Image: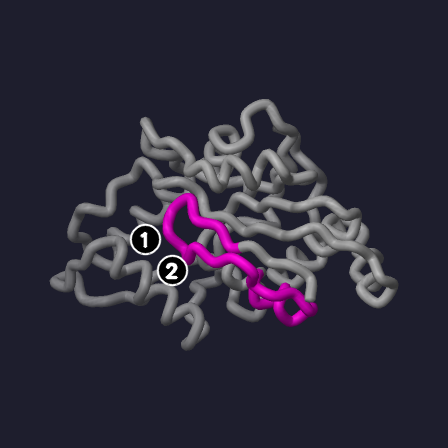
Amino acid sequence: MTHSESAVQTPVAAVQAVEAGVRFGAITLARHGEPALSRKCMITSDQYRDWWGRYEIGGLRAGQTPPQTLLTAAEGAGAIYASTRPRAQETAKAVAPGRDVLVDALFIEAPLPPPRFPSWIKLSPRYWGVISRVWWHAFNHHEGQETRAEAEVRADQAARVLIARASEGHDVLVLAHGYFNHMVGQRLKAHGWRLAHNQGFKYWSQRRFVKR
């Protein structure tokens, strides 16, 4: 597995090749496998802040096997990207063993700082994640971390990097995170790509985009 310079610096001139009749490869955005950190607990919003911090540095639950469809996507990819988070890198090792993988922080998940709720309110991490995402997305609750506007800029940068690589005629696979993959997908659509195959956002799922 290799580490690239920040993908933001990758030349994006190939994006303009859209009008030049270039044959593009497909772009597949895949979510990582199931993390080892359990969601089967009831915690406060402050405890969720700590839980998310541990989730961000944790890897995958042992004993998982990637679906054959994702293994096939990796085999056909001319370039594979992964975020810098351990769960994404371990996913890359499981899906594409022995392959060079471009590991870049450009593809990390958007932050999930929870709003401060009273300590008597306890929910599972799954529900805290939904609440935190709504507060971040709709109410700009970021606690000094990346804002929604900043993440949207990053998502567009990521989309342009992937389009530039796909313009070389090879399929591109990204192994990253559910919500930020969604944001990148929205930017791909804005740049003239369509969702050709959709497995949703569950672990190991993939969403395949092709140039219109």
Marks 2 and 1 in Cβ contact (< 8 Å): yes
Label 1: which residue? 49
Q: CA distance from mark 2 to mark 1?
A: 6 Å
Residue at the (37%, 34%) spot, across then down:
60
Answer with left or right where residue 124 lies relative to residue 151. left
The quadrant of the rendering that contains the N terminus is: top right
At horizontal 45% and vertical 36% (from top left) the residue drawn is: 68
SS state under label 1 = helix
Residue 208 painted magenta? no
Instruction: Looking at the picture, tell me which residue is in the foreground, 57 or 62.
Output: 62
Residue 141, quarter of the rendered image:
bottom left
Q: Label 2 neighbourhood size at 10 Å, few (<14), some (14-19), many (20+)?
A: many
Q: Position of residue 53 (x, y in %)?
A: 37, 46
The residue that appears at 74% across and 54% down in the rendered structure is 24
| Residue at the image point whose x is 56% and y is 60% from the top | 196
Pinpoint residue 162: horizontal percent, then vertical percent. 68, 52
Residue type, label 1: Arg
Question: Could you tell me if residue 8 is visible in this image?
Answer: no
State which region is magenta.
185-207
Q: Position of residue 51 (x, y in %)?
A: 30, 47
Q: Check the image and tell me how it is coloured.
A: one colour
Q: Which residue of the protein is positioned furthest toward the left in this rendering?
A: 120
